[in-house]
Image: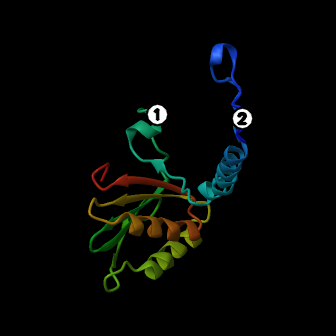
Amino acid sequence: MGGAAPTPTGKGGKKPLDAAINLVPFIDLLSCCISFLLITAVWTQLARMDVTQKGPAATGAQDEKPPENQVSLTLFINEDGYLFERKGGLSAPETTEIKKNGDDYDYVKLAEILHKVKTELGDKNDIAVKADDKVIYEKIIKSMDVALSEHFPDIALSDKGAGG
């Protein structure tokens, strides 16, 4: 007789259905996926910026009138730089133009102007940012970061064509 072990046979000469599946690689893969998802879930909160949409759909009620002494602040971003506009209140409307500093936007000058406005209007928390279509997204976010750092947390973002 030979040295080979006889193969197990089931009923009628068929192979048995009992198969041994190694679950260790599956458990390793599953634990790696779960740990990856748990670690990256924290970063979704850090990379988020809360803005509201400016326009008739965001207001809800169409027949509401704004208060007489309400001050509105608008920051227009275009290819040439910024145009900061202050309307309402007891003073006449003001428009301040901030040209680019070389190839980049002048974030320092923007911060100075927003800081000056914030010291004058301490309770004012909202600002509207209207960007031209040709402005790079990164520049819009950096400008909004400047507004956040100068304590304007309520930012409404729209394109330049909506309402102005």
Residue 38, position as x, y percentages in the image: 69, 52
Nearest the camera: 18 or 149? Answer: 18
The coloring applied to the image is rainbow
Q: Which residue is drawn at 37% across and 77% down?
A: 105
Q: Examine the image and state in which quarter residue 55 appears.
A: top left
Whole-number angstrom distance, CA of label 1 to CA of label 2: 63 Å
Q: Residue at x 58, y 72 (%)?
A: 119
Label 2: which residue?
20
Label 1: which residue?
60
Image height of 82 relative to 1, above or below:
below
Residue 16, position as x, y percentages in the image: 68, 23
Image height of 57 relative to 148, above or below:
above
Q: Which residue lies furthest to the top in this view?
A: 12
Secondary structure under badge 2? loop
Q: Which residue is drawn at 51% across and 71% down?
A: 146
Whether residue 122 sits left or right of residue 66 in the image: it is: right
Q: Examine the image and state in which quarter residue 141 appears.
A: bottom left
- Crowding at dot 1, Cα within 10 Å, few <14 / some 14-19 / many 20+, comes out as few
Looking at the rendered structure, the kind of residue marked 1 is Gly
Residue 54, position as x, y percentages in the image: 42, 47
Q: Residue furthest front?
A: 1
Nearest the camera: 102 or 21? Answer: 21
Q: Which-is-in-front pick, marks 1 and 2?
A: 2
Residue 56, position as x, y percentages in the image: 38, 39
Looking at the rendered structure, the kind of residue marked 2 is Ala
- Crowding at dot 2, Cα within 10 Å, few <14 / some 14-19 / many 20+, comes out as few
**Residue 38, labelled with which disc?**
none
Image height of 148 relative to 27, above or below:
below
Image height of 13 relative to 100, above or below:
above
> Which quarter of the rendering shows the N terminus?
top right
The answer to whether marks 1 and 2 mark residues whose Cβ atoms lie closer than 8 Å is no
Secondary structure under badge 1? loop
